[in-house]
Image: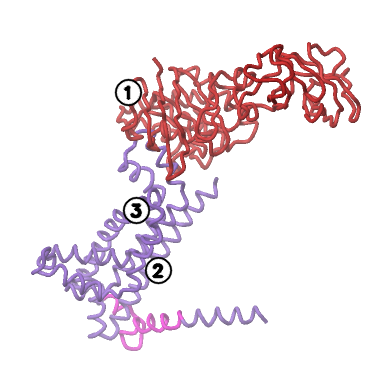
């Protein structure tokens, strides 16, 4: 009887998630009346605005990942190595983006960095892009920090650091040659999650008026019927692709460890 | 002039002083062991030499140059850790080459030195292996090669054998000593295993509660312990309370039996109590046992341990344990019988603190 309820719950859960996806995918293929076709996908992929916004978001995601890694890896490493007492506070700070809405953060940015402020980042395109990247990095912080911190927990960073120091290495060498390669899988997990967040993010990009993929999806959804469904399927596939890559990378690491 | 000098080294963690006025001079090429129980401060002293801890007071010099204000990566000291600490993302050759690469040595020189080091530890055939593909003993040998590759002035070994099984420990400690002598490198070895320290050191520092209780050659530490702590910690030792009978003739009594000591009693008076130490291997109850001193008592236990027979005998209030080498003709004393333990009076040492 217990098994019956367990299977029942699982099937209900699967249907709850899969049925809307199937419905959406089915709808995205019905642009041509009476037959299934990939017309909606072709229209989306052929749209220059799609190419522009998608490329922009990919570049922003890559910049955010680089910035996030440069910010989070040394911070998490230093906190674990030298300031373990601060860990609960740092964890709390990194969790804040989960409870503070993106709209609050972006309005805060606009107030702080508008053209009449002491650092008028919104006055130029590059400045606004940098501001948006900071915003994305903030949104991705809980995931990136947790991934890296978990990775650092799995290695004896204190002894590895001391071993490297006794061999003449400075902090940059230790971080680049010892710490980063040993938490690379964790960093990649954080990077894929960051990528998925940036690709779908709407609020910050819209309010900073940047040509990102999120606002494009919203714009398309407001004016078209089949294309938004096709776009949603593509975006969903991209996100799942990222999650699949995390699994793949994690499995690769597990394989390496089990060989020991 | 000494090569490595520690002068009045002190270290406190908050209100707790873990190293108290520690002084030590080590000659070039010497192998010195810091021996002591957990928490005695031996690893803290080692970490101060390496630069991982800053002394609260005192000075450290290597070859006349003060090290106190140098960062660990500026000290030219090689270190081997208990947990191996090989870099998991690098194979054996890359691990050994790390220090040389950091120093910016030319590639040809690095390749040559890595080959030389792997030959020294006899692991040339495992150059491409990663740490997780090797045993603990192999990993520790690689760690030793890695520490030696940049030709450090001083080699520090922080309980490098503690994580290994008994057989590997013995073979690796012999290998470490052989390599140390071959390279003539000044070495400081931290251990809590007295057998390890006794077997491979030129000198031993027995540490207790943050200070050096005794510094000396292994035989001196073992045969002439300076303090009760050293006597207790190094080897198995009988500590016997004796009453002074006549200070002028060095006569004392153990229970109701008189013994004349070789060592002068010093400033004590009749009726005072003195602590005497006797090594288990110093005495025997065998019929042909030699010695100018005898104690008679009741045998309370006799255990066959293979190469030796360990017997415990009650003499007055004292229980004396002694080991006799096993031989086919030896009949160990039976429990409950009265037996006579013979030894040389010179083996009875006075413990003065």
For residue B265, what is the image quadrant? Answer: top right
* Residue B350 in view of the camera: yes
Q: Which residue is mark 1?
A: B65
What residue sits right under mark 2 in the picture?
Answer: A240
Look at mark 3 in the image and give the residue it sits on.
Answer: A73
Q: Tell me, yes or no, whether dots 1 and 2 are on the same chain.
A: no
Which stretch did the figure color magenta? A17-42
| Viewer-closest of A239 and A226 | A239
Mark 2, residues whose alpha carbon is within 10 Å: few (<14), some, or many (≥20)? Answer: few
User: Mark 2 or 3 closer to N-term?
Assistant: 3
Q: Which residue is pictured at 41% across the width and 53% down the height?
A: A84
Q: Is residue B49 left or right of residue A128?
A: right
Q: Main secondary structure of the magenta part?
A: helix
| CA distance separating discs 1 and 2 | 60 Å
Q: Residue furthest left?
A: A116
Assign a secondary structure to mark 1.
strand
Q: What residue sits 30% from the left and 68% below the top?
A: A139
Q: Are marks 1 and 2 in contact (CB under 8 Å)?
A: no
Q: Is residue B98 visible?
A: no
Q: Chain of mark 2?
A: A
In the rendered view, would you say A79 is above or below B107?
Answer: below
* Most foreground residue, B194 or B339: B339
Q: Provide residue A233's location: percent of width, then percent of height.
A: 35, 76
Q: Which chain is red?
A: B
Q: Nearer the viewer, mark 1 or mark 2?
A: 1
Q: Chain of mark 3?
A: A
Q: Which chain is purple?
A: A
- Which tag is nearer the camera, tag 2 or tag 3? 3
Residue B311: give x, y in percent of width and height. Answer: 81, 27
Figure check: A94 above or below B38: below
A96 horizontally vs B89: left or right: left
SS category of the residue bearing label 3 = helix
């Amino acid at each position: 009887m217990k098994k019956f309820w367990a299977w029942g719950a699982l099937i209900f859960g699967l249907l709850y998630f899969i049925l809307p996806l199937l419905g959406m995918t089915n709808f995205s293929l019905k642009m041509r009346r009476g037959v299934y076709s990939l017309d909606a996908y072709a229209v989306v992929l052929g749209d220059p605005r799609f190419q522009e916004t998608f490329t922009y978001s990919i570049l922003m995601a890559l910049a955010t990942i680089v910035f996030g890694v440069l910010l989070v890896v040394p911070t998490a490493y230093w906190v674990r190595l030298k300031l373990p007492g601060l860990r609960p506070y740092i964890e709390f700070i990194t969790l804040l983006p989960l409870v503070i809405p993106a709209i609050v953060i972006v309005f805060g940015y606009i107030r702080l960095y508008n053209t009449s402020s002491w650092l008028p980042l919104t006055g130029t395109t590059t400045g606004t892009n940098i501001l948006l990247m900071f915003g994305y990095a903030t949104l991705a912080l809980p995931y990136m920090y947790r991934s890296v911190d978990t990775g650092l927990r799995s290695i004896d960073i204190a002894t590895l650091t001391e071993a490297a120091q006794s061999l003449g290495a400075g902090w940059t060498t230790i971080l680049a040659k010892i710490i980063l390669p040993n938490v690379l899988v964790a960093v990649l997990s954080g990077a894929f999650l960051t990528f998925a967040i940036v690709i779908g993010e709407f609020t910050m990009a819209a309010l900073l008026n940047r040509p990102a993929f999120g606002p494009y999806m919203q714009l398309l959804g407001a004016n078209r019927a089949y294309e938004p469904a096709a776009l949603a399927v593509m975006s969903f596939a991209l996100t799942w692709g990222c999650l699949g890559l995390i699994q793949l990378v994690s499995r690769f690491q597990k394989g390496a460890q089990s060989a020991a | 002039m000494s090569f490595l000098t520690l002068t009045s080294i002190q270290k406190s963690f908050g209100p707790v002083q873990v190293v108290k006025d520690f002084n030590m001079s080590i000659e070039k090429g010497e192998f010195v062991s810091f021996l002591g129980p957990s928490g005695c401060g031996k690893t803290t002293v080692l970490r101060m030499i390496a630069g991982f801890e800053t002394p609260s007071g005192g000075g450290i010099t290597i070859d006349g140059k003060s090290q106190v204000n140098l960062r660990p990566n500026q000290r030219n000291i090689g270190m081997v850790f208990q947990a191996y600490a090989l870099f998991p993302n690098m194979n054996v050759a890359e691990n050994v080459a790390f220090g040389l690469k950091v120093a910016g040595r030319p590639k040809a020189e690095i390749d040559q030195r890595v080959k030389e080091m792997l030959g020294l530890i006899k692991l040339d055939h495992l150059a491409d292996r990663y740490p997780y593909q090797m045993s603990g003993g192999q990993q520790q040998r690689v760690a030793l090669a890695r520490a030696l590759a940049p030709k450090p002035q001083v080699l520090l070994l922080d309980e490098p054998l503690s994580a290994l099984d008994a057989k590997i420990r013995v073979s690796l400690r012999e290998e470490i000593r052989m390599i140390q002598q071959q390279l003539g490198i000044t070495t400081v070895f931290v251990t809590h295993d007295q057998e390890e320290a006794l077997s491979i050191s030129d000198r031993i520092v027995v540490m207790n509660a943050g200070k050096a209780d005794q510094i000396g050659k292994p035989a001196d530490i073992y045969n002439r312990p300076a303090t009760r702590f050293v006597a207790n910690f190094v080897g198995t030792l009988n500590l016997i309370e004796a009453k002074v009978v006549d200070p002028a003739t060095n006569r004392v009594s153990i229970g109701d039996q008189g013994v004349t000591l070789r060592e002068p009693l010093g400033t004590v008076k009749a009726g005072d109590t003195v602590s005497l130490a006797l090594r288990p291997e110093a005495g025997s109850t065998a019929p042909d046992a030699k010695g100018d001193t005898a104690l008679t008592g009741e045998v309370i236990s006799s255990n066959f341990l293979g190469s030796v027979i360990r017997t415990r005998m009650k003499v007055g209030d004292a229980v004396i344990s002694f080991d006799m080498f096993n031989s086919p003709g030896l009949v160990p004393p039976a429990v409950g019988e009265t037996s006579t333990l013979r030894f040389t009076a010179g083996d009875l040492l006075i413990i003065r603190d």
